Image (cartoon, coloured by chain):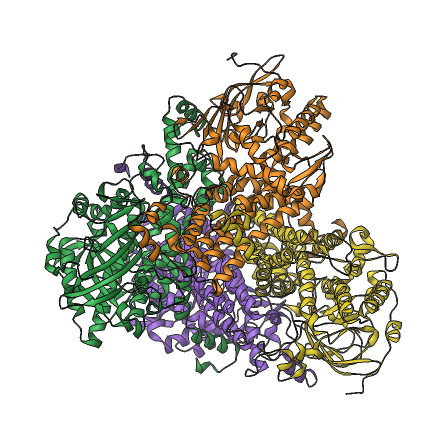
Chain colours: A green, B purple, C yellow, D orange
Amino acid sequence: MGVTRVETAAERWARFTPITTGEEYIESLRGRGVKVHLLGERVEEPVDHPIIRPSINSLRMSYDLAIQDPELATAWSPLINAQVNRFLHIVESPHDLVMKNRMQRRMGQLTGTCFQRCAGLDTISVLHSITFDIDKKHGTPYHQRYLDFLKLAQQHNIIIGAGMTDPKGDRSKRPAEQADPDLFLHVTRRTKEGVFITGAKAHMTGGLNSHWICVMPTQNLQEADRDYAIIGLVPGDAEGLTYIYGRQSCDTRALEAGDIDKGNAQFGGQETLVIFDDVFIPWEHVLMDGEYEFAQELVTRFTAYHRASYVCKTGLGDVLVGAAASIAEYNGADHASHVKDKLVEMTHLNETIYSSGIASSYEAKPLASGIYMNDPMLANICKHNVTRFPYEISRLTQDLAGGIMVTLPSQADFEHEETGALLDKYLRGRASVSTEERVRMLRLIENMTLGRNAVGYLTESMHGAGSPQAQRIQITRGMELEAKKALARTLAGVIATDQV
Amino acid sequence: MGVTRVETAAERWARFTPITTGEEYIESLRGRGVKVHLLGERVEEPVDHPIIRPSINSLRMSYDLAIQDPELATAWSPLINAQVNRFLHIVESPHDLVMKNRMQRRMGQLTGTCFQRCAGLDTISVLHSITFDIDKKHGTPYHQRYLDFLKLAQQHNIIIGAGMTDPKGDRSKRPAEQADPDLFLHVTRRTKEGVFITGAKAHMTGGLNSHWICVMPTQNLQEADRDYAIIGLVPGDAEGLTYIYGRQSCDTRALEAGDIDKGNAQFGGQETLVIFDDVFIPWEHVLMDGEYEFAQELVTRFTAYHRASYVCKTGLGDVLVGAAASIAEYNGADHASHVKDKLVEMTHLNETIYSSGIASSYEAKPLASGIYMNDPMLANICKHNVTRFPYEISRLTQDLAGGIMVTLPSQADFEHEETGALLDKYLRGRASVSTEERVRMLRLIENMTLGRNAVGYLTESMHGAGSPQAQRIQITRGMELEAKKALARTLAGVIATDQV
Amino acid sequence: MGVTRVETAAERWARFTPITTGEEYIESLRGRGVKVHLLGERVEEPVDHPIIRPSINSLRMSYDLAIQDPELATAWSPLINAQVNRFLHIVESPHDLVMKNRMQRRMGQLTGTCFQRCAGLDTISVLHSITFDIDKKHGTPYHQRYLDFLKLAQQHNIIIGAGMTDPKGDRSKRPAEQADPDLFLHVTRRTKEGVFITGAKAHMTGGLNSHWICVMPTQNLQEADRDYAIIGLVPGDAEGLTYIYGRQSCDTRALEAGDIDKGNAQFGGQETLVIFDDVFIPWEHVLMDGEYEFAQELVTRFTAYHRASYVCKTGLGDVLVGAAASIAEYNGADHASHVKDKLVEMTHLNETIYSSGIASSYEAKPLASGIYMNDPMLANICKHNVTRFPYEISRLTQDLAGGIMVTLPSQADFEHEETGALLDKYLRGRASVSTEERVRMLRLIENMTLGRNAVGYLTESMHGAGSPQAQRIQITRGMELEAKKALARTLAGVIATDQV
Amino acid sequence: MGVTRVETAAERWARFTPITTGEEYIESLRGRGVKVHLLGERVEEPVDHPIIRPSINSLRMSYDLAIQDPELATAWSPLINAQVNRFLHIVESPHDLVMKNRMQRRMGQLTGTCFQRCAGLDTISVLHSITFDIDKKHGTPYHQRYLDFLKLAQQHNIIIGAGMTDPKGDRSKRPAEQADPDLFLHVTRRTKEGVFITGAKAHMTGGLNSHWICVMPTQNLQEADRDYAIIGLVPGDAEGLTYIYGRQSCDTRALEAGDIDKGNAQFGGQETLVIFDDVFIPWEHVLMDGEYEFAQELVTRFTAYHRASYVCKTGLGDVLVGAAASIAEYNGADHASHVKDKLVEMTHLNETIYSSGIASSYEAKPLASGIYMNDPMLANICKHNVTRFPYEISRLTQDLAGGIMVTLPSQADFEHEETGALLDKYLRGRASVSTEERVRMLRLIENMTLGRNAVGYLTESMHGAGSPQAQRIQITRGMELEAKKALARTLAGVIATDQV
């Protein structure tokens, strides 16, 4: 302790160069000297690691799309009087939130996986109002610090990762009660330059692919948890950070030769455990320190934004509808009425998710700081549907794919001098479609329903932005039972109409 | 034939006086001399019939609400430069559609049943653009006639019923192919004053409670069906009309003494078979005559509007959530975790419906005539959820109600000198709640899940605005399978990215 | 108190004559002088009351079927060395339970409603072993009394109703804790001739149509509840009994002229509140008195038998599958692929229920008294599916029926001189089917999904033999979580294999 | 062609030694010289290949269980007057089928995967009656050949694999119509010694782990398909056979060091594409040759047996219930009411599957050859539930596991000198449980819901023994719609009761 190098905010920003293209983004991640472990080994250059690279490609798409479709993926920022990437834009209207949803769906369509930039975007949104509200109560300078940081972030067009989920240890104990105080990230000491933090953030989405990480509390806090009430911005290459890469189903296929068995060779998601060992944050980058009573509201607002962000999964759903329709066609089964009916059902479920997400955005209301927040009830409804429908869409896709989806030999067997011809002969479906096309489509379906991107399409849909029970708790809070009971009593004649 | 009295448009309008209050609305229905049959008898004055009156009360609420909550239930009409009932307002923006949805939910909350005015409202909306489009192609004068009519409608604040569903006979045959030509409503002759029509419109919602009925085609038509391509406005008391009232589950409880067993004594729905026997329509009130090629588009647009109108059922869902919570409380079971969980599930389903409805409205786009139409895909998604979730909400309500909901003795038994005290003693739940309160709440639940208003909450949710398969056909049309297949092919590496 | 006439067991039996035919059964119910209230009036002769009679017809079917299909509906009783109605037979083997299930399904097919005799049958079954077990512990004479009673019951071929469900009052309090001690039925005094009981049994299925009622505890009891631990047999016409008839959806259609609108004119269910005011039971008919510690086991065994008895609902499901197929045919829609698919889904759900019921029966194990009890886990599974699938079968039936199901005019309108011809003309579907046939089928569907027999098919499926949560509690008890955790630990390598 | 070595039946059997223990079974697979390809390479000795071995271990369990629990896993064979492995026993009674189901569930519990021996067992069953029926019609000697073979199979205690599924090519064409005649396996020539066959069998379960393969038709055949009507027994090491191993999700984790990330290190499933290139079968081992009209019935009976065999998945369901309960406990969340409720739901679904399977078995009826076949309707119901409920059980397990299930670092990271301690510190849940235990349980859940054994638990549950639509077709055939329509007509009063 006490050995961490103290850097000023300016020193930290000095390491960054403004980014425009996807290619520049990838270059910006090189040579940062971050400490990364994957499959038991220290990774020298994550950018070139075949398991990691597809996850970087997904984020890269957010830069490329801004160029290809600026109306969708950029917005005018009054902060810097310039067009900025929409992932760095603050929410000035319900329309901004709807455009966010459309961009998320498109990103999902283009990558077929988690593109990792939404949590950071929703963090930007929530910090605007929370810092404002804290300042109002405590006279703190957080909101201006936030705006200063955001301007630089927009000017440099960098990626911010959200460091929210603490490891939590024993779920029945509060942060300050844990046997090991580090099971929630916390401030260990304060100096005149800034604060030092220790702890970890679990399954951080795209953590390693971000330029800055924003740490913040993961749950409501009490007075005893004061040191856990910290929000701060940390560059991804700060001293004291260790990233340990999470395994995904079928991750090592990325290490194999050939692109077919990967299913989706280009794109993947990423979640890492990020350990903070006495990491320094200069005061300019501290946005909460001890104001524990705002932690609950921070989480509530963050989840309001973030649960509606899960409309991204409808983009993946679009890919699966397309894959299911394609494989039915390749199998020669596309005219069967039950096939058509299953495609309709998949679409119906997918659009139901989408509609609850954008409804939440359209119904946004302004907060005290002047930005808009989507309707929290409908955001929870959206996310709750996301914990259900992708599983059914996945099941229906597997139904249409046929069993061959899980019994296909490897690409190497298809390319082998002896077995290649045999496989080509025997695994052909409809004559007009090559065996390879059929195999590729089956591997994409495997990728999204069992393999690497099933992690994002299924399990992350379940737990990201809060597990199902977390939504049910929020729905309970917003369901206005007393008003509804009054409606029922009135119609039943239990009380006079004018009491409603 | 040929004996029907020919009236001018002006003569017909002369019978109406502008309406403001709900009370005036009820008076406006009196003494019209309409030919109504119910339970095998001619009803002399429908307004005072105890089975019919609750259905009128539901519509009356649309007048009362306009006074109580003008922001919600009225809108400024540029047509007549005045504030008009929102049920007569044309859709000038997505906001208008969202406000419509909010008003519909509120009406559902206040009546607990089908309030019968949405089909007419959605008819007004669709006719604006359809008449415009026909005129553009054919140089016809329909759009101006429409505007003229609508101005008078707004000035008189009358109710328009939608006469859409023909009896259809053999579903495998087209209108002109039916053995009996009257199984679809059609023009039998044309004179210089106007047209004469014969046929019937089945299960017309609130038909008898409307001042005017707009007849229009119910499905796509071909050239041979030209005489079936008729849109016209008919006053509800026109010569040649016969109304035969549809029975509802438990309808005759309305004839019993006491208000408890009715469940919802005040409000009910209404559907009638309306028979048109050589009914005259002056040319001023004819808005389509033979332009069969617009029938398909008419239906598609009408269902886009009307399927999103089914968010009204979320108002009924609110009542059921309230009733379920109330009865759990009266039974002393409100603290059980499974009870709370079921209320959350009911709310989740109800809000999912709501979100798909308002999302459709927010995503509205302008049509050539200048008004807005909601997103047809999301409207179909909304209605498709309505064919499922109310049944599950109803099931969960019955779960929380307990079996006593279907074994309660009659109100007369509760009031009987011998059995009254016994029932009060033995059917009490939690001591702090009177037996009567408990019984009333159970009867409301019976009303909405098995009885009179279950017709509206369940079966009409299934079939109104088109049965489930009709939505699946529309979803098929809008699901853009080729674009989605291209997404899948790109990610699977089947085709080059730039082809997408 | 103290004024009730004391009768001997023999005096009570002397009032009965052996019954063979259904006609004799109906006669056996006449002139009993029972005190019955319905719709606020004392009913002089229930047998001839048009609302009550259909419920009697359902039970009558159990006599007629025994004659028509003796293999199915009778069994050889070693107790009296004669063939007896299977509803009075004790369970000598798993085969007996399976035959019971088959008979129940057949009865459901033939009546389309609750035929009210299963609870009594399952009572006979559970008393065999419970009386045996009490005697073994306490040296009481209950088992022999039980056998003596059952012999007479078999010889007279009478119907036994199960009086189980107490009104319960405040669900958070035990019997002895209730403000009003009568909210659970209990012994008020004991004399040398017998016991006197006071209280009520709620929604007793077919109570009024039974010759004898067996009262028994409805839940587990503690020492303070000793007086509530009573099992006794009471003739249906005993002094002190009052029956208050439960209303059903659409019950008064039975009072209307014509048979069409009733939907199922012949058959109905019945549930009554039965009040016991100082009712006497001679010792010969007392089968438990104070052995409170057996109440829990009594309930557990009864529900094991009775929850599997809910396969009866698959008979009703068969009727609905048939009705849905018929109406699709009458509408001319039977060749649509979605129609066929929905019929398959209905069948799949219905047979799933059936399979869990008969699986429970086949897996029966003998109890100490020598009779068999079905597998309790699978019986709970069966019943739990019954709380879900009939609702979905009903929903799908309404889908296939079309909206006309809830907007049909009354039979009187069809028969009216003016409207009759109009309705016949306009409400015809496929030309080869008469309008009346179509209307009848629609009315049957209304009857089973909203009307009188929806009470039995839906709400009783939910709550009869215990509400859903009661099954979940039993499933929890039987789920053997520790053994399953051991399986998981072994495969995960958490513990050595030999520990499993 | 024509170069394949002709062997007699006796020569083929001479290569086998009777097997008793699991260890002997494994030895029996060594040194067979089979031609196997996996991941692009010829595998010299499959028994020792780390990807293949777990699949062999699963089959080995069928030998070990026969020794550990002979009542469950062996049966007395009258054919050889000895106790034989139940997987080689013919079905002499419904009890045999129920015992089969119990053994299957137990095997599933012990291996957590597909143990690959059911298809062979069900093949033995179906051949008994089919050969009998063919002989009866055609005077062929197939049944005796079958019995002779089965005796030797029982004496040697060998494993028989079912070679049923042809590659099928274009699904819209029949076998004889395919462009490539080999897309269905067929006889290419007949000599006095036997027949020669060419073609392939796709995704053969445990094909490589079997001693003999029984080829048989996969669908109904017409006269033009006569050469495709072949049933024959081929030793797994016959000349002309090539096995190409199917990839599974996460298969290469078996090649990694450490056992944790494998999830279930010991057991796996196996499916291979088996290519038959001019493979010889002596007449003694030919059980059908050209009797195409029996192909349909063969398939129907096979699926009746095999669809009920899918109760095996309830054994896997038991493991998942145990794993979900364990991880909830390790996370400290086991007392939450929603956790308990989800475990109940999982159990309910799992037991529903089990009940439909054993119900089918208990309802077995004898066939002409004297053996029993389970009820085909209920077998289809069972399998149809298997295409749904495991997906929901899997979803609920992922819910209880938490997101950490898909973001865990690798075992190597846990063992790394730097990261090991960090991971142990930060990924601990409840203090009393080691981090390793928690990780192992999460990896098991990953294995069964996304990884290697998800292939068996999910996708194979969907498609094995026929895809969902295949069951719906069979349900359609058995649903007896006319009888059900008659029930409905009777109750609706459409026809007189006596017509039913």
Along the horizontal axis of the image, is C229 left or right of C481? Answer: right
Along the horizontal axis of the image, is B139 left or right of A467? Answer: left
Out of C67 and A116, give the one closest to the viewer. Answer: A116
Out of B172 and A388, give the one closest to the viewer. Answer: A388
The image shows residue B195, relative to residue D449, as above or below, that is below
Evaluate whether residue A332 shows in this view: yes
Along the horizontal axis of the image, is A374 left or right of A196? Answer: right
x, y percent for residue C156 = 86, 65
Evaluate whether residue B192 shows in this view: no
Could you say which quadrant of the image residue A279 lies in? bottom left
Out of C438 and B459, give the one closest to the viewer. Answer: B459
Q: How many marks?
A: 0
The image shows residue A346, relative to residue C162, as above or below, that is above
x, y percent for residue C401 = 57, 54
Looking at the rendered image, the quarter that the N terminus of chain C falls into is: bottom right
The image shows residue D53, relative to residue C225, as above or below, that is above
Out of B326 and C80, give the one closest to the viewer. Answer: C80
x, y percent for residue A16 = 13, 52
x, y percent for residue A490 = 49, 78
